[in-house]
Image: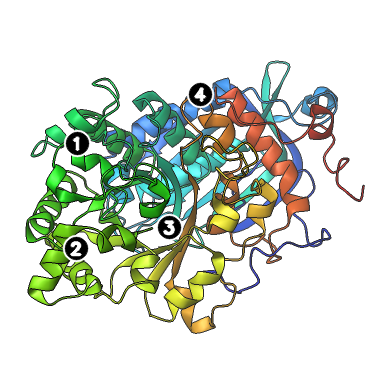
Amino acid sequence: MAPSRYVGILALVAGCLLPSGVHALWPIPHTLETGTTALTVSPFFYFDVQVEGAPLDLYEAVSQAQYYLANDKLGRLVVGRGANDTTALVGANTLSTLTLSLMSGATVEPIASEAVKPLGTRSEEYTLTIPADGSAATLVANSTLGLYRGLTTFNQLFYYYGGVTYTLLAPIAITDTPAYPFRGFALDTARNYYPVTDILRTLDAMSWVKINTFHWHITDSQSFPLEVAQYPELAINGAYSPQEVYTPSDVQYIIQYAGARGIDVLLEVDTPGHTSIIAATYPDYVACFDETPWATYANEPPAGQLRFALPEVVNFTASLLASIASTVPSSYFSTGGDELNTPCYTNDYPTQLQLNSTNTTLNDALNTFTLATHGALIAEGKTPVVWEEMVLDWNITLSNETIVMVWISSEDALAVAERGLRLVQAPSNYFYLDCGAGAWLGDDPTGNSWCDPFKTWSESYTFDPLANLTEAQYELVLGGEQLLWSEQSGPENLDPIVWPRAASSAEIFWSAQQPTGAPLNVTEALPRLQDLRFRMVQRGLKPISLQPYWCAIRPDACDLTA
């Protein structure tokens, strides 16, 4: 965990910055030592895997690293893009090998198996050493997952000019470990559909910045694109079209693809709110379906929520969630629980009849519903994940292991922590990537998005995960994530609206501070984020520009006080 509550706070002046010229690494490692010697990469460079019984996905990771090393061809972000480096490269030593090995006694498992272990038990640390004399570089870890993280760092260290791949910073010594175990990105694929290829590309980009959780908000009131074997009608009736679905094989392929990149897939099937579309298959299970005016019954159209007070709905939902959870390897499953609209139930005859006949309150009914649905997940070996309202707005019984996502405001983390529950920081006032695009509702020409303004990378980067918490509560913070809700997004703008902004939280929750111990600092970080952004472009992504190109190749020249 981070050593200080001040980690992540914006430093207004650059102090205790990284070694000069270290613009390549994101997230910045825990410890970093560099030199000033040029070192070129041999055209015959190879990765030497010294891991007995190495799994297939480790060899695939090595092949991926080999590809990036050969094809990134990123010129240094300076005027001339490396043309002035040629003199230093004359007569430079040549690096021919990176040796990968595990520490003595380490258990050899696939990266994908390591990636889905419970939080706090995953071993992501590694040590990377690159000598200046051309002798073999070494990457050592306690797991294949740690080796994967180290390969990601290794690939960021090199630039390209005139047919030569090189670094000017040898020798290099890195010892690295994450500050927080949960580092996520959330994507809503229900408001608008994203083809599998777009999700895979996003997983690639996540792996480049060591994000380890894909929070997949896969269903909502607008559509139910997830095919569930036991309940096939939900997608048949609830998907936008027969082509806009996620089949069981799609989901398994995405999970496998993510796992091989060190990423756990956290599925979310939001209940009992955000479920209007279920009425297309089970109309008797949904209250206030498509009622108008919708704003009376929902936060956004269409209105409709599960009649969670009805025993048959409780049984249905528990069965549905368990049947989905049983098909995924993650230790975690989200049941949502946000934005529950109570007027919907006040005016719903079946709900009121059930409450009155059993002499129970709506809160009591929600407690019964939650105990049943979470109990079904726990029986499948899953730890439930919920949005903050389930803790702060309702008096219900949750397992002490439940993870709470704080989203309404960063100020709410304290109230969750005071209840002794573990939490993930996902505050809309820092981490919502969809904010600032204006209103998407019709007949509202002067409207703004509810969470204005646009969240720049630098504003997100100033977030302090431990603000307002006591030192005793720090351990409850598992990490955090940035999120894209898709009312105004789809595959067409996925890359630029997410990247490189989503890298902000990746560094907050991996690094927490600079290697010197100084707080993270936007002045120091910008050249490194520029470097990451240009490397992403080289790899086929389409991230948004951070500044004019003139600024990008002149680090710090466009700072406010330059």
Label 2 close to label 4 by CB (< 8 Å): no
Please rate how many residues cluster around mark 2, counting C-alpha atoms within 10 Å: few if below 14, some from 14 to 19, many from 20.
many
Crowding near the residue tagged with mark 3, few <14, some 14–19, many ≥20 C-alpha atoms within 10 Å: many
Decide which of tag 4 and tag 1 comes sooner along the chain: 1
Residue positioned 46% across, 77% down in the render = 415
Q: Mark 2 points at which residue?
A: 374
Q: Residue at label 3?
A: 182
| Res 127 visible | yes
Which numbered disc, 3 or 1, marks the residue that appears first in the sequence? 3
- Label 1 Cα crowd, 10 Å radius (few <14 / some 14-19 / many 20+): some
Name the mark nearer the viewer: 2 or 1.
Answer: 1
Coordinates of residue 325 in the picture (x, y in percent): 18, 49
Mark 4 to mark 3 CA distance (whole Å): 28 Å
Identity of the residue drawn at 82% across and 40% down: 555
Q: What amino acid does circle 2 point to?
A: His
Q: Are marks 4 and 3 in contact (CB under 8 Å)?
A: no
Residue at image point 32% right, 49% down: 274
Q: In which quarter of the image is residue 313?
A: bottom left
Task: Give the answer, above or below, for where 323 lies relative to 103.
Answer: above
Q: Name the residue under label 4.
A: 492
The one of 30 and 168 positioned closer to us in this rendering: 30
Q: Kindly identify the residue that appears in the image at 65 percent across and 40 percent down.
A: 446
> What is the spatial separation of the Cα atoms under label 3 and label 1, in whole angstroms?
36 Å
